[in-house]
Amino acid sequence: MKFAKNKTNRQFATDLDKNDRLKNLRHRFYIPENKIYFDGNSLGLLSKDAEQSLNRVLDEWKNQAIGGWLNAQRPWFYFAEQIGEMAAKIVGAKPEELILTGTTTVNIHALISTFYQPKGKKTKILADELNFPSDIYALQGQLKIKGFDPNKHLVLVPSDDGNLLDEQKIVEMMTDEVAVVFLPSVLYRSGQLLDMEYLTNEAHKRDIVIGFDCSHSAGAVPHHFSDWGVDFALFCSYKYLNGGPGCAAFLYINKKHFDKEPQLPGWFGYKKEKQFDLLIDFDHEKSAGGWQISSPGILGTSPIEGALNITLEAGIENIRKKSVHLTSYLICLIEDLLENDHYQFKIMTPRNPEQRSGHVAISHASETYRINEALKARGVVPDFRPPDIIRLAPIALYNTFDEVWQVVHHLKEIVDQQEYLNFSTDKRAIT
C-alpha cells in the first residue's frame, strides 16, 4: 500500500483519522488513561457493550437465580449455541458448526482426540515449530494417550529463518504417513498469515484431515471455514474479539463430520432436548455443540455477547480493510524512519498485506527487550515475545492512525536519547 510523500508528517495521520469510517466505535471502548494500547492481539479492551451484557447477566442471576437457565434474556442453557451463531458470520461458518465452549487448549484436546485416528501407516500429526507452545503440548499429549512417541510421530515443519513458514514446504511434508495436519492461521510472533484455503485443498488431495488454531486471526481477518472445507478449527475470544481475560473459546466442526463420536464427551454435548433425561449412554448433539464438555461459565462468557455486537456492526470486511491500512502505515513509517544503520530496527512481518494478520513484529539489532520496556514507560502498551520480538497491534475498532504515528516516533526518540539504558535486561513473568 502506497502513501503520499508527506506520510511522516503528523497531519497526514490526522487526515487519515478524519476519513476513517470506523472512528466512531472508539468511544465505545474503555481506553486506559494516558496510554496508547497496541496489545489487543493479546487482550482486547473492554467495551461498554461488553460491560452492559455482563451487568445484565449479573442482574439476571441476582433476580432470577436458577430461573436464568431458561428465562434470562438470552437463556443460559442456549447461550453457547446462540453466541456461536453470532460469531459464525465472522469466520464463515454455518450457525450449527460453531460453538462457544472450553478454552483454546481444551478445544485442541477435544478436537484432536476425535480427528486423530491413526490407521495403518497414517500415524503422524503434522504441525510446525513456530506454533504457540500450548498447541504443541496438547498434540504431544494426544499422541501419548494413543500410544505413540511424539518424538517420532509429531512432525514439525521447520522454519528457514526462525520467523516465517514456507507453505510449499508444509505441503511437501503432507506425506502418506500423516493422519492430521494442525496449524496456526497466523504465526503468533511474526504475524504471518497462512493461506488456509490452499493448505486445506492440498491436505484433502492427500486424504488428510486438517484443522487450524485461528486465535491470532479471528476478528481481524475474514475467514470462510465452510466454503474452504476446513475440517475443524478453534480460536480464543479475548484478543481481536474483545471477550475479556480468559473468556471461553470457540470450536468449529465442519458439518460433514457431525456424525463422528466426540472422544472427550461431557454432558453438555448430549442431545439438547434430552440432556436432562440424564441417561447413562452418551448420545451427542449432531452439531459443534456435541463437542461441549462442561456447563458454560455464564458470567465469564457474558461479555462476549456485547463485544460481538460491535464487531458485527463494524463488519469483518471493514475491520480487515482498516487493519491492513493501519499496519501498512506502521510498516511504511518504520521503513522510512527506523529501518536503517542508525536505528537498527527490522520488520519481521510480511510486507504483503495478504500474508499478515493484525499485528506488526519488529526487532532491534541488540536492545529489543529494553526498548520494549522504554515504550511502556512512555505510555505505549506493546508486548515482547522471546527471543527478540516487539509486537505492535493497532486494532481497527479502537486505535487511530495518529497513534501509529506517535508509536513510531516514540521508538525513534527512545533510540536517539538512549532511554533503553535505564532498564534492566531481566524479564518479567508476563512480557
Image (tube, helix red, strand yellow):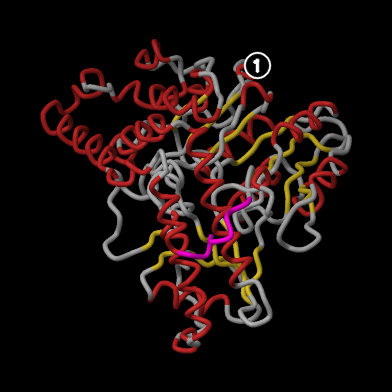
Whole-percent x and y of residue 136?
A: 65, 51
**Horizontal arrangement in the rendering, residue 154 relative to residue 35 (left or right):** right
User: The disc labelled 1 sits on which kind of residue?
Assistant: Lys
- Foreground residue among 255 and 223: 223
Whole-percent x and y of residue 132?
A: 61, 54
Tell me which corner region of the image, top left, top right, bottom left or bottom right, holds residue 70.
top left
Q: Residue furthest left?
A: 63
Q: Which residues are magenta?
A: 2-9
Whole-percent x and y of residue 268?
A: 42, 25
Residue displayed at 67% across by 28% down: 230
Residue displayed at 56% across by 39% down: 221
Residue 5: say if magenta.
yes
Q: Is residue 87 above or below residue 335?
A: above
Q: Is residue 11 above or below residue 187?
A: below
Tell me which corner region of the image, top left, top right, bottom left or bottom right, holds residue 222.
top right
Find disc 1 in the rendering and name its residue: 256
**Horizontal arrangement in the rendering, residue 384 relative to residue 177 (left or right):** left
